[in-house]
Image (spheres, helix red, strand yellow):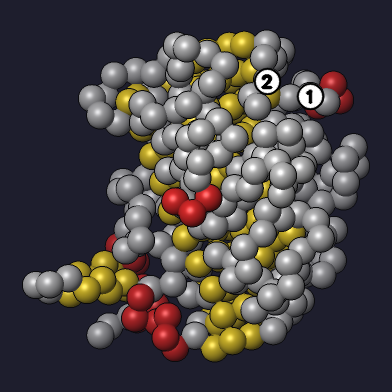
């Protein structure tokens, strides 16, 4: 069988399709269920684990974490290989990561070929919450945010934070109407990525920007998420590289916004070489575009070589003083 931890097996009527993940280069292929998450041949062999606080300088392999994993302050150098994060059976009382990395001093938390899908659906579940992580070839679904990325330390006193998300597949997101999720007047604000502070490299990912069928329609009668990528500095200033991704759906596929005057300055965003769908909802603008800058001044934005996936024509950028819903 070779290196089982690097291969994914998908059954078909005629043959078994084998993907050698070690040979894959982020940004050269569109991730899907065969190239992300726990490989199929390993799923039945995962061991349930009630771990909540991983140990520094430790690698965890072939586990199914059935509690909420949250590295304690100053935890460093933890790697998860071929692991499922399903959360506790008890629903959370506030926004909670299936793995949360925002405690002070947490560094270098690495996820390779992991699956994030809560076993108990709820509008407070997030995939990875915090910063200072690397997520590589992971699968995210049935959460309100796959990544809610921000540094530890709190608003105004945030630490330095670096995160990298590469070659992940983000799809079939969760949503609740405002009668259940009252955090917003139009229900859950579901995003594949919500960058609230710190630095991220988001490279070679596939984010569909749509809800799982059981969560549709949303408040507006469609299956779109809020923004596929929401870049909104409300914990600290942000630095983002968004490069060589496949991005679709959302009210806007990428929305850059702010509502905290402390973090208007020193935001640097590079959006290059991405492929976009033509399926954004963007309800507040009849001339919908995939990339919207909402009421942001003084933004250091470089956007180049971004095209529609169907025919390679360049996308346009819409600037607006109206924030995304």
Q: Which residue has dot 2 on it?
A: 323
The foreground one among 271 and 312 is 312
Q: Are marks 1 and 2 in contact (CB under 8 Å)?
A: yes
Quick check: 241 left or right of 235? left
Residue 132: x %, y % from top left:
69, 55
Q: Locate the C terminus by quadrant.
A: top right
Residue at the (56%, 51%) spot, across then down: 174
Residue at the (81%, 38%) spot, across then down: 235
Residue 45: x %, y % from top left:
44, 88
Quadrant of residue 122 within the rendered picture: bottom right
Residue 176: x %, y % from top left:
63, 48
Q: Locate the N terminus by quadrant.
A: bottom left
Q: CA distance from mark 1 to mark 2?
A: 9 Å
Residue 245, visible in the rendered structure: no
The foreground one among 7 and 224 is 224
Residue at the (74%, 24%) spot, across then down: 258
Q: Which residue has dot 1 on it?
A: 259
Quadrant of residue 233 within the rendered picture: top right
Q: Residues within 10 Å of mark 2 (few under 14, many from 20)?
A: some
Residue at the (9%, 72%) spot, across then down: 14
Quick check: 23 left or right of 198? left
Residue 255, visible in the rendered structure: yes
Residue 262, placed above or below residue 172: above
């Amino acid at each position: 069988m070779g290196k089982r931890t690097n291969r994914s097996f998908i059954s078909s009527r005629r043959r078994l399709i084998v993907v050698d993940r070690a040979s894959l280069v982020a940004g050269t292929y569109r991730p899907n269920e065969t190239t992300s998450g726990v490989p199929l041949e390993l799923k039945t062999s995962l061991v349930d684990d009630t771990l909540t606080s991983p140990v520094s300088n430790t690698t965890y392999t072939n586990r199914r974490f059935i509690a909420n994993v949250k590295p304690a302050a100053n935890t460093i150098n933890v790697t998860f290989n071929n692991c499922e994060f399903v959360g506790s059976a008890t629903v959370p009382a506030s926004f909670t990561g299936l793995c949360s990395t925002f405690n002070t001093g947490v560094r270098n938390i690495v996820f390779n070929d992991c699956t994030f899908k809560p076993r108990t659906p709820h509008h407070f579940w997030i995939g990875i919450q915090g910063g200072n992580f690397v997520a590589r070839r992971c699968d995210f679904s049935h959460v309100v945010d796959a990544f809610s990325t921000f540094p530890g330390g709190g608003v105004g006193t945030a630490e330095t934070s670096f995160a990298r998300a590469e070659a992940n597949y983000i799809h079939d997101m969760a949503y609740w109407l405002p009668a259940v999720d009252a955090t917003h007047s139009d229900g859950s604000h579901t995003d594949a990525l919500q960058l609230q502070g710190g630095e991220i490299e988001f490279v070679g990912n596939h984010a569909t920007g749509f809800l799982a069928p059981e969560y549709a329609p949303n408040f507006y009668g469609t299956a779109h998420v809020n923004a596929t990528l929401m870049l909104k500095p409300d914990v600290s200033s942000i630095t983002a590289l968004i490069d060589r991704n496949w991005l679709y759906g959302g009210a806007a596929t990428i929305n850059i916004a702010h509502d905290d005057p402390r973090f208007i300055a020193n935001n640097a965003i590079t959006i290059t070489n991405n492929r976009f769908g033509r399926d954004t909802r963007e309800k507040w603008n009849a001339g919908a575009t995939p990339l919207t800058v909402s009421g942001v001044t003084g933004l250091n934005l470089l956007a180049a070589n971004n095209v529609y996936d169907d025919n390679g024509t360049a996308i346009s950028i819409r600037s607006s003083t109206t924030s995304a819903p």
